[in-house]
Image (cartoon, grey):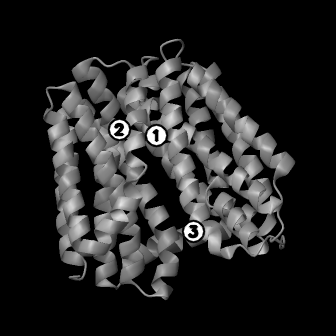
């Protein structure tokens, strides 16, 4: 059916574009800001504040997609992303670059959830509901493919002109905006009247989510949320330091770091499939315990590496283990709790983990500044070990 093919093509295009964006942001953003001579703590503070702002905007921007139009929400997202990255391309003053960065994070909230919701509704309209899982998994592959291509583009472009990567992201998002404007159809969505004071009500909902976290009575849920927090701290603190580690310890240039991320992205593509087989064989408890032990060991060996090859190999293993743990963590949440609790876990995790990530990024910057890079990375490895122990004691024996 032509409509289904068009829906898939647009969704995969969005995911691919987001993959390119993520590649540049994860591998090169910190080094780009540092190239202007800005202070590390100032940069990590910016990233932390921007993440918090993104959490606040998740709720009201989601209302636009839910009540008004998914297409409109996605158009706003991609045009603002284009403007944001163009700002990173043209500006050189910190406050202007910071404003562009924050605009990009706000822009992402208009797209978060709206793209998959639109695509799933479209498949339901076309009576292709059975293909939803295939659509989501293919979308994941396109996003990872975009990440790999983004890394390769960075490898080629950064040595010519560091700024050009942001122009490429800006143009790709603008092209995606035009495609959505011209070709996207909403056939299974009826706009409803936006509730009065919906922005205020959405933030009240956010406050209620935090209150639920603080007052949760379910002991197992509380322990799993704590394990989730520790896993976010492990990942966020480690990956902030990775580009600095390569530049300071091995003298690797930004374009080569981008190439390293591209290679590792290829390795991680098949991890969720492998993770599914591992969890089916060994169960959630043993799988998560083992994976976070392996993640922690990878971080520690990476940090003490004297060889660039060993560091890259350890980073590759780490990314494979992390991609696998993400899938098993999600499955564990769904398996452990009934549908009533499960329904609220998605938004709860999003708010909690994004907030944790924001705080972690800020303190990681301080840690690198005052403790040093290696000690900060080792701390992230130790926290990973604590995460594995929490999973071991919190989940049922399989």
CA–CA distance in space, label 2 to label 1: 10 Å
Q: What residue is rendered at 34% in x and 79% in y?
A: 221
Up/down of 309 relative to 364, above or below: above
Relative image position of residue 357 (x, y in whole percent): 39, 51
Q: What residue is rendered at 23% in x and 73% in y?
A: 282
Which residue is label 1 attached to? Answer: 47
Q: Is residue 149 visible?
A: yes
Residue 274's disc is none
Crowdedness of circle 2 by 10 Å Cα count: few (<14), some, many (20+)?
many
Q: Are marks 2 and 1 in contact (CB under 8 Å)?
A: yes
Which residue is label 2 attached to? Answer: 240
Q: Secondary structure at mark 1?
A: helix
Which residue is label 3 attached to? Answer: 133
Quarter containing the N terminus: bottom right
Q: What residue is rendered at 47% in x and 74% in y?
A: 345
Residue 90: quadrant of the picture:
top right
């Amino acid at each position: 059916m032509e409509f289904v093919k068009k829906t898939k093509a647009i969704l995969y295009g969005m995911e691919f574009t987001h993959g390119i964006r993520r590649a540049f942001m994860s591998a090169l953003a910190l080094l780009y800001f540092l190239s202007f001579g800005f202070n590390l703590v100032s940069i990590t503070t910016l990233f932390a504040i921007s993440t918090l702002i993104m959490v606040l905007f998740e709720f009201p921007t989601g209302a636009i997609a839910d009540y008004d139009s998914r297409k409109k929400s996605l158009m706003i997202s991609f045009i603002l992303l284009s403007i944001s990255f163009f700002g990173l391309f043209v500006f050189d003053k910190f406050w202007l670059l910071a404003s562009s960065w924050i605009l990009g994070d706000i822009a992402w909230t208009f797209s978060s959830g709206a793209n998959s919701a639109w695509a799933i509704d479209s498949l339901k309209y076309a009576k292709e509901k059975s293909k939803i899982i295939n659509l989501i998994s293919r979308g994941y592959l396109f996003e990872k493919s975009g990440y790999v291509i983004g890394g390769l583009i960075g490898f080629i472009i950064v040595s010519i002109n560091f700024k050009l990567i942001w122009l490429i992201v800006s143009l790709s998002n603008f092209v995606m905006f035009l495609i959505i404007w011209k070709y996207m159809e909403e056939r299974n969505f009826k706009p409803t009247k936006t509730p009065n004071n919906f922005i205020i009500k959405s933030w009240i909902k956010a406050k209620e989510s935090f209150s639920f976290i603080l007052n949760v009575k379910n002991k197992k849920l509380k322990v799993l949320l704590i394990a989730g927090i520790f896993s976010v701290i492990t990942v966020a603190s480690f990956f902030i330091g990775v580009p600095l580690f390569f530049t300071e310890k091995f003298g690797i240039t930004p374009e080569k770091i981008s190439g390293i991320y591209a290679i590792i992205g290829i390795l991680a593509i098949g991890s969720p499939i492998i993770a599914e087989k591992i969890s089916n064989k060994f169960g959630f408890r043993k799988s998560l315990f083992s994976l976070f032990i392996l993640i922690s060991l990878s971080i520690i060996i990476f940090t003490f590496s004297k060889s660039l090859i060993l560091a890259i190999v350890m980073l590759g293993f780490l990314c494979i283990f992390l991609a696998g743990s993400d899938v098993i963590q999600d499955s564990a949440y769904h398996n452990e709790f009934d549908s009533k609790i499960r329904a609220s876990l998605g938004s709860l995790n999003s708010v909690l983990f994004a907030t944790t990530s924001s705080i972690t990024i800020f303190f990681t910057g301080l840690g690198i500044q005052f403790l040093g890079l290696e000690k900060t990375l080792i701390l992230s490895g130790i926290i990973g070990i604590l995460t594995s122990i929490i999973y071991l004691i919190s989940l049922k024996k399989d």
